[in-house]
Every structure is written in C-alpha cells, then in structure tokens.
Image: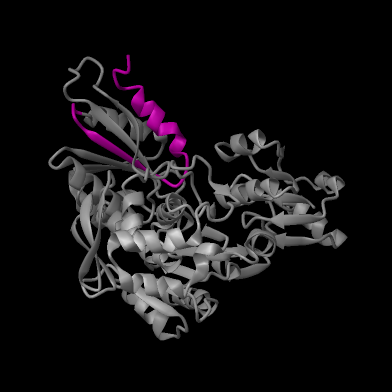
C-alpha cells in the first residue's frame, strides 16, 4: 500500500517509515522543519519528505494516512488550523490511523513481541535486548527510539533464527550448566518464532486515541523497567500512569512473561491490580535476577546462584539494572544468562547516551589534561541524577560540569523543578538553559548556591561554561533535543588541531 506519514521525522514514526519501506510499501511523509538525523536516514531509503502540513498533500491519494502524535486539532492565533492537512483528511473522510496501530496490524501481527516499558532506560534496554537476541542468532526485528550503535539503524524487520532452535536453547544452557533452564526453555518454543523488540512508550497514541502507545503492541514478553511521574502534560498524577501500565500487563498472555524491577513500589502497585502471566523480578537482593559487584563488572545471580558475569564499558547502576532486565527477558525466548552476558560484553551504547563528542585540551593548555564533552539524552530529574552518578563513578574526583536544558513538556511545566538540585547533587557545577521556561530556574536552583548558573540563551550558557572550564574537566550536556548545537560550540573551545 501507499502510506503517507504525518510527523515522519520523529524517532518512532521515522522508524515505522523504515519498516514499512523494508516491507515493500510505498512511503511518503511530511513534517515541520524536516530535520536530521531521521530526515537523512529516510532520504537514503528513497522516502519522499515534504515540508509542512499543507492540505495540498491530499493530492498524493495514499491508501492510508498514518498520524503521528505531534499532530493535533490546534488553532493558530488567527484561528486557522495548525495542521491543515489533518483537517482536510477529516473533511474528506479519508482513511487514517495512528502509528502504533498501523505497526500492530502490519508488522507485529504473528510475531513474538518483546516490549520494553519504563520511565527511564527504554531506548538503552531495548537496544541491549535486541543485541542479545542478535548475538544468540535469533535475528530479531526491532524499533528503537534512538540509534543502537551495534546495528547502526533504529529499526529493521528482522528474519528468524539463523541457527537451529535446539542450539539456541541447549548449547547456551549447557555452557551455563543449567539443566533447570534447559527444561524451562523446552516449554517455550519462542526461539523458533519471529521476534520483534520494541521500545514501549506510555505517552498517548494520537489526538484521536488517548491510550498509551504500548497497549497496541500485545507483547508476549514485557519489561517494566521503572515507573515515576512524567508527562505532566497528559497525566494528572503517578496513579494515572500506573493505570496505563496495568493496561499493558492486561495484554500479556498467560504463557507470557512480565519482567519487573523489584526495587520499584510503583510497579508493585501495578502488579497488585492484576497480573495473569509468569513474573520475573530483577534488581532487589531477593529478586529472581540480581547483580553483585560494580556496574562495569558484576556477577548475575539467579535465585541466589551465580549464572553469568557481565564485564563491559558501561557504567552506572541504572545500566546494571537495564542489563538484568534484558537478561531476564532474553531467557524467556531461550537465551541463557551466560550467552546474554557474553553479548552485553560486546554491547556498544546508543547514540546520545554518554556519547563522547569531543576530547582535547583547552586551547593553549597541555595535552596531558584534556577536556571531555559528553552528549546524553537525560531530561527527567531521575535520569539526570543517574547519568551524573554514572559519570562520577567513571571519573572519580574529576570535575563534572553538568550543562542541561529542561526541554520536555513535563520540565517546561515546572512539575519537577524542585528535584533539580537533588538530581545535580554529584556535579561540581551546573549550568541551566532557561529559554522558553514558564518558571524561575534561578529560584529552583538556589539551593545549589554558587555551584549553579542560569542563562536565558545558548550563547549565555556557553559563555558561563567557557569561563568556568579548567583542564581535565568533564562537560556533560543533557537534553532531549539538539540543545542549539552546544556540543559543537563547546568543542570549538578546545585545541582540536
């Protein structure tokens, strides 16, 4: 069919476009300010991109319009529609659907779906799980809200096992010496199925479908990684989000598995609302899967017995928990913890997750003390705190300069501004870009005293950071947007020749 995607440059919709194109459909799309990296990836696939949402696109006459959740019935100041193409679709009675529903009906149907849900770590954990299954020879399809560097693409349809299912089930278990697991996996022939790993977002589906995206995916394996209050623009409180997570749990079959973070009270409440599937917990000392050791080198314990060891380049307790979640989910489709841990040893993190953008000495300074500039997607206070903590574990007493912008809808509303000093506790200095905020960032960061500075423009923040930089500093830039190219501007301060 020919599908035309409204809002095609978002990570989810762009991934959907790539999957549809790979499946043989004709794909076109539009967005406001068609932007990379997704625009570059889509053009490389031969997908026509149109700037804006004008009604003239009706002339394309696609079989289906697929509507991203960026689209709404909003009106501009003069009363005209913000999305005239959507109005034309409605007026004409043309066929339309949401991205998650189209994906469920045309890609996920008949597959064993492994869905990764949670307030934090969805992209990283989805990438870990996809890589573990790939390493085990299962050739999963996947859709990730980022670019996993082990694959270099954000989405693919996948195939099927490239090795006999017996090898996937028996050999890893044999190496681990785990006859109990061999018996368990024999009852779950998922390793012979086509697998699809998907990042499962709790944000609403579309302006006409206010259910969370993840209820469309019908997973047989579901990871509930963590759960905090977020998305203050659409959820009133934590209980409202817990209800949506319970809706996800309702869709998992009795032969399925729910993998849940045993440290999260909110997820305990979710399961108390009802769970009809096999449960596996991780994280807590009494969980089914637990970690013993530092985040970069730890033993994996299953029911108190060591079954694997993860040694990798990642740091941070949050990544340790992400790894346990991926190991527990992979076991459900026949991959032993031993093989999963081997795979994680070769895992390369997702683009924009503690990604080193530049490392060089300050201009005129000796090369023995370079400044390192990192780019990270963190934007929720808890994500900021865990990211800073991960870097602190890595650099020890080195100075950390945290540079961030509260850009998400939740942060712009100021719903979590009081948590910012807590989230930045382990940073030596903090610099906040306050442009576009409806609340006083100076007041919110006042508990940090002189350790925090606020600038109302990117250039103002850049000047503050430049004045504070010292040899050997670690500059951690955190935003869920492009941050005005601040990483490149900071790199220009360094001696890059």
Vertical side of 496 occupied by 178: above or below: below
Q: Residue at x 50, y 63 (%)?
A: 191
Q: Is residue 93 left or right of residue 450?
A: right
Front residue of 302/460: it is 302
Q: Where is residue 98, by image quadrant?
A: bottom right
Which range is magenta?
470-497
View extreme (left): residue: 397
Examine the rendering and report whether any part of residue 75 can be seen: yes
The mark total stands at 0
How was this image coloured? one colour
Q: Residue at x 22, y 25 (%)?
A: 370
Q: Position of residue 359 (x, y in %)?
A: 29, 27
Front residue of 482/128: it is 128
The C terminus lies in which quarter of the figure? top left
Vertical side of 347 occupied by 122: above or below: below
Q: Position of residue 408 (x, y in %)?
A: 46, 53
Front residue of 136/98: it is 136
Q: Position of residue 297 (x, y in %)?
A: 21, 51
Q: Where is residue 89, by image quadrant?
A: bottom right
Q: Position of residue 243 (x, y in %)?
A: 48, 78
Vertical side of 485 occupied by 270: above or below: below
Q: Is residue 174 left or right of residue 163?
A: left
Examine the rendering and report whether any part of residue 233 can be seen: no
Q: Is residue 196 left or right of residue 375?
A: right
Vertical side of 46 occupied by 323: above or below: below
Q: Residue at x 40, y 47 (%)?
A: 377
Q: In the image, is residue 485 part of the stretch drawn in magenta?
A: yes
Q: In the image, is residue 45 part of the stretch drawn in magenta?
A: no
């Amino acid at each position: 069919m020919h599908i035309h995607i409204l809002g095609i440059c978002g990570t989810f919709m762009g991934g959907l476009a790539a999957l549809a194109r790979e499946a043989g459909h004709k794909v076109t799309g539009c967005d406001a300010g068609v932007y990379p990296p997704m625009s570059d990836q889509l053009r490389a696939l031969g997908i026509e991109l149109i700037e804006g949402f004008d009604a003239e696109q009706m002339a394309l006459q696609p079989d289906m319009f697929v509507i991203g959740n960026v689209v709404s019935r909003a009106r501009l100041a003069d009363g005209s529609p913000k999305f005239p193409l959507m109005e034309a679709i409605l007026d004409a009675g043309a066929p339309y659907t949401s991205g998650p529903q189209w994906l469920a009906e045309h890609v996920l149907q008949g597959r064993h779906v492994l869905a990764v849900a949670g307030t934090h770590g969805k992209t990283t954990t989805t990438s870990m799980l996809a890589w573990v299954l790939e390493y085990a020879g299962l050739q999963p399809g996947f859709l990730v809200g980022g670019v996993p560097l082990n694959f270099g693409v954000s989405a693919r349809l996948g195939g099927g096992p490239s090795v006999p299912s017996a090898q996937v089930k028996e050999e890893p278990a044999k190496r681990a010496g785990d006859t109990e697991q061999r018996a368990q996996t024999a009852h779950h022939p998922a390793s012979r199925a086509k697998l699809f790993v998907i990042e499962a977002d709790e944000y609403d589906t579309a302006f006409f479908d206010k259910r969370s995206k993840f209820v469309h995916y019908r997973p047989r394996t579901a990871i509930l990684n963590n759960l905090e209050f977020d998305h203050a623009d659409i959820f009133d409180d934590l209980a409202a989000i817990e209800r949506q997570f319970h809706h996800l749990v309702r869709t998992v079959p009795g032969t399925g598995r729910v993998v849940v973070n045993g440290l999260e009270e909110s997820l305990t409440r979710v399961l108390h609302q009802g769970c009809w599937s096999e449960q596996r917990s991780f994280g807590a000392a009494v969980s089914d899967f637990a970690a013993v050791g530092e985040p970069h080198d730890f033993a994996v314990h299953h029911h108190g017995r060591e079954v694997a060891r993860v040694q990798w380049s990642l740091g941070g307790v949050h990544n340790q928990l992400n790894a346990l979640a991926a190991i527990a989910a992979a076991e459900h489709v026949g991959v032993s913890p031993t093989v999963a841990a081997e795979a994680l040893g070769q895992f390369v993190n997702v683009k924009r997750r503690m990604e080193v953008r530049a490392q060089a000495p300050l201009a005129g300074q000796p090369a023995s003390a370079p400044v390192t500039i990192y780019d990270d997607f963190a934007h929720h206070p808890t994500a900021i705190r865990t990211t800073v903590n991960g870097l602190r574990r890595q650099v020890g007493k080195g100075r950390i300069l945290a540079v961030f912008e509260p850009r998400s809808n939740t942060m712009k509303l100021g719903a979590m501004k009081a948590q910012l000093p807590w989230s930045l506790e382990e940073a030596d200095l903090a610099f906040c870009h306050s442009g576009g905020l409806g609340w006083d960032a100076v007041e919110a960061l006042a508990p940090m005293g002189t350790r925090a500075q606020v600038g109302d423009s990117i250039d103002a923040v850049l000047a503050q950071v430049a004045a504070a930089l010292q040899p050997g500093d670690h500059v951690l830039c955190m935003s869920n947007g492009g941050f005005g190219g601040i990483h490149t501007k900071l790199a220009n301060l360094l001696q890059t020749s």
